[in-house]
Amino acid sequence: MNQGQAQPITFTRTNQNVKLSSLDQASIRCYYQFVQKDKAGLLQIDTMTLDIGAQMSKYYDLTKQKQDSLYDANLNKYMSNINPNTIRKISVIKNQDAPGDGHFITSGKRKESAQLFKSRQTGQILIIDGFEGEYYRFAEAIPPQAWQIAADTATILGYLCQKAIATFRGRNYEAWFSPEIPVNDGPWKFFGLPGLILKITDTENIFSFTCVGIENLTPPRDITIEQVRFINASRNELATIKLKKEGELWVTNNGGNIILGSSNAKDDYYPLELE
């Protein structure tokens, strides 16, 4: 190490300034509370966003960038307490748990990192997921779910809703849609009803999507996609990659030998799709 004036060590992500392309313009933004139960019975809660345009929609986690920035800030705070003149080596390792107690470790909760683009007219769905500077793409054609509309009604966010049921990818679902919002869309891969889906749950009570807010966007906002090089992957391949790269991030300092590491995500969650 140079023995000049000590400079703080900082870490920043390299993909924050990615160029964007506009696919459509969203006039409605919906916020959904996505709840999933893990295999131990604990609940993981995320707030997901659905931006709805005339032809396309985008379903994503609006807070993910804030979560990434928070991790960067915490990591930089940890590193600022280390005298750079004492650093001997910085190493990066993957797929390994933190070695012992007393190390800085991020939250281990599962984060919904994928962006899902849905074309309601064609049934084309494009999923983009990024990990450690690499972007993966998976495209598939999904027809609207074969909904059966029931006579039951309920009120959600002040909107009168009707009940509908369907089976999708091995799970049975109960949905509540509102004809008062005549948009053929819903959270995740759900669509095909004569009104916006405001709530949907599976019959085993493992997953639920509940609309907690609706915003009219004036002026409309662009529905954007990153201009980056994508790696094509199948649905199963993407799930495997996600499990490998979504673990905890940690850092440790042992006598000036700094290790930045990541552990594999624990397979503690049920898959949404069984088929």
Image (tube, rainbow, N blue to C red):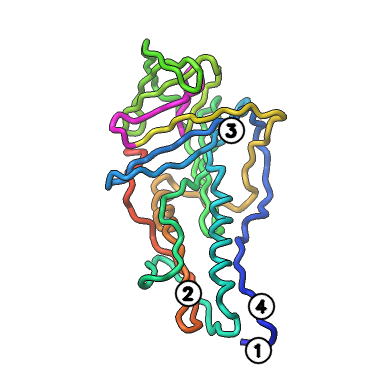
In this view of the protein, can residue 169 be seen by the observer?
Answer: yes
Tag 4, which secondary structure? loop
Nearer the viewer's eye, disc 3 or disc 1? Answer: 1
- Amino acid of disc 4: Gln
Whether 51 is drawn above or below 89: the answer is above
Report, in whole angstroms, how far the alpha carbon at label 4 lies from the one at label 1: 11 Å
Residue shown at the point (70%, 28%) measured from the top left? 218
- Amino acid of disc 1: Gln
Quadrant placement of the N terminus: bottom right
Q: Residues within 10 Å of mark 1 (few under 14, many from 20)?
A: few
Whether 215 is drawn above or below 117: the answer is above
Mark 4 and mark 2 lie on one chain; the one further toward the N terminus is 4
Residue shown at the point (57%, 61%) measured from the top left? 72
Mark 4 and mark 3 lie on one chain; the one further toward the N terminus is 4
Mark 3 lies on residue: 51
Mark 2 lies on residue: 259
Q: What's the magenta region?
A: 188-206
Q: Nearer the viewer, residue 89 or 15?
A: 89
Mark 4 lies on residue: 7
